[in-house]
Image (tube, grey):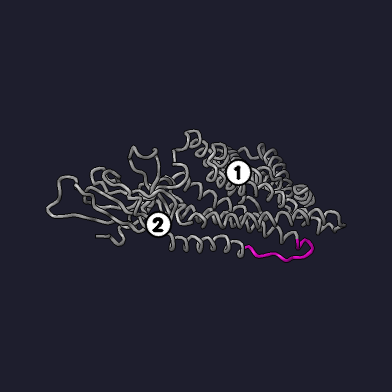
Amino acid sequence: MAYSNLHENMASEFTISSDSFEPNTTFELNSKIIGAAVYPPLNKSLNNPITVTFSHAKISSGKQICSFWNHSIREWSTQGCELDEEHSTSTKTVCLCNHLTNFALLLQREGAPYSDPPLSLKIITIIGCTLSILACILCFIMFFTLKKKDIRHYLHINLAFAIAVAQLILLFGISQTKYEILCKAMAACLHYFYMVAFLLMLCEGVHLAILIETAFSHGELKLPVYLITSWGLPLIIVGITLGVRYDNYGGSIACFLSADQGTVYAFVGPFAFIMLINFAILVIVLRQVVRKTSLPISSKTASKFEIARATIRSLIILFPVMGFTWIFGILFFGFRTLALEYLFAIFCSLQGFFIFLFQYALNTENRSAFMRATRRLRLTFSSSTHSTSANGLKHTTETKGKISSPEPPQEEDSSTKDNCHLVLYRTVDDPAGGTIDSRTTSTFI
């Protein structure tokens, strides 16, 4: 008896406890499950083995393993079954077994067997992701202190949010392999948020190219176009992949896309395409910078062009953070070297930290805006506290009948305080003031 869809409810990849294979060697089902039984049941092995023929679910050069489901240990076992190589082909496998039970064909994974990463690598990932998430929170705090926000600020903060969520899943969700539905959900979410991050990087590149090309005009894409593309297109990619390759989300090792049936290319493909486009944009933009810096330009255009130069510098810093991180990952899965594994863990886990460092902490404009907001908040709090104290003092002196003595010093202090208060606010808040304009301009030089 062949079960029509029982194999679809089994884990997509798993290990078996057998001395015949290397530890942590992974397998997958490569056939439907076939059951054979007689009544009354046999209590001993068959003298003449039965022949079970399996049609391959997937054509592969990997090793085909004859197996049966061992109810005692609740996993697949190879005892009592062997491969009939003489009658097996590339599309079917013939097995000989000396007992009756539920049989299936296993496909041994190609490549090096999986092994747990070193403890130091796990520690690096945990520390890096924690720093990255905290840095993304700081990005949000500094973002809301900016009075004037342009498109690049919104792209940066959306990128920080996508990375923060992805790394939260990386910390707490990718290891939930014991719960199949939860694991598949975590894999789909991780796929989605990293796709969002990659597309936001593409929008960064496109926006930068448009900004450079229209330095003397006003042709720019609107922010909603970038955000709808970045957050909407990944829904389509992940939705189609889930519909076509649902079983390849999650696994027994990690809650992510499986390499089976090319499913992982739903992640690697868009990433490679986006990185190629961004690299081409970067080359074009840098050529434009070299060409336009040699031309005489007006002060108004110069200001916009200097902003573009700052954005280029930001992209040069951010592009390696996003691109080379995943290049290290792809190289690691191809070559399996410890050095690449460490580089991948370091750069991937610190993405959010690098965004905060280069786009906010080391950015003169954003840092100055944050300091002004901090001073304004501190001054407001100080003014409120001092005003409360002065009112209390006045009430006390009036109660005791000593009105004339305390009043002159109080008025003088209040006047002095108010003058300082106005000067600080005029210096900080006047958007047309020369100080702010010159400070903002110096940020981009």
Residue extent of the magenta highlight: 213-223
Magenta run includes residue 215: yes
Q: Residue at x 71, y 54 (%)?
A: 282
300 vs 326, nearest the viewer: 326
Does residue 211 show up magenta in the picture?
Answer: no
Name of the residue lying farthest toward the front: 86
Is 412 or 210 nearer to us in this picture?
210
Q: Residue at x 83, y 54 (%)?
A: 293
**443 to the left or right of 171:** right
Q: Nearer the viewer, residue 244 or 320?
A: 244
Q: Is residue 409 visible?
A: yes
**Rendered view: 24 above or below 279:** above
Q: Is residue 4 above or below residue 14?
A: below
Q: Does residue 138 appear in the picture of this structure?
A: no
Main secondary-structure element of the magenta-colored stretch: loop
Image coordinates for residue 238, horizontal then vertical, percent: 48, 60
- Which residue is tagged 1? 381
Quadrant location of the N terminus?
bottom left
Graded by Cα atoms within 10 Å as few (under 14), some (14 to 19) or many (20 or more), the crowding at tag 2 reads many
- The residue lying toward the viewer, choosing from 10 and 78, is 78
Instruction: Give percent across and percent down for residue 267.
Output: 52, 55
Task: Identify the secondary structure beneath mark 1.
Answer: helix
Q: Amino acid at mark 1?
A: Phe
Q: What is the residue that sits farthest to the right in this orientation?
A: 296
Which residue shows up at 36% across the image and 44% down it?
Answer: 15
**Residue 247 image label:** 2
Marked residue nearer the N-terminal end (1 or 2) = 2
- Judged left or right of residue 402, residue 45 is left
Spatial CA span between label 1 and label 2: 57 Å
Q: Height in image: 237 above or below 12?
A: below
Q: Where, by quadrant of the figure, is residue 151 drawn?
A: bottom right
Q: Position of residue 272 (x, y in %)?
A: 59, 54
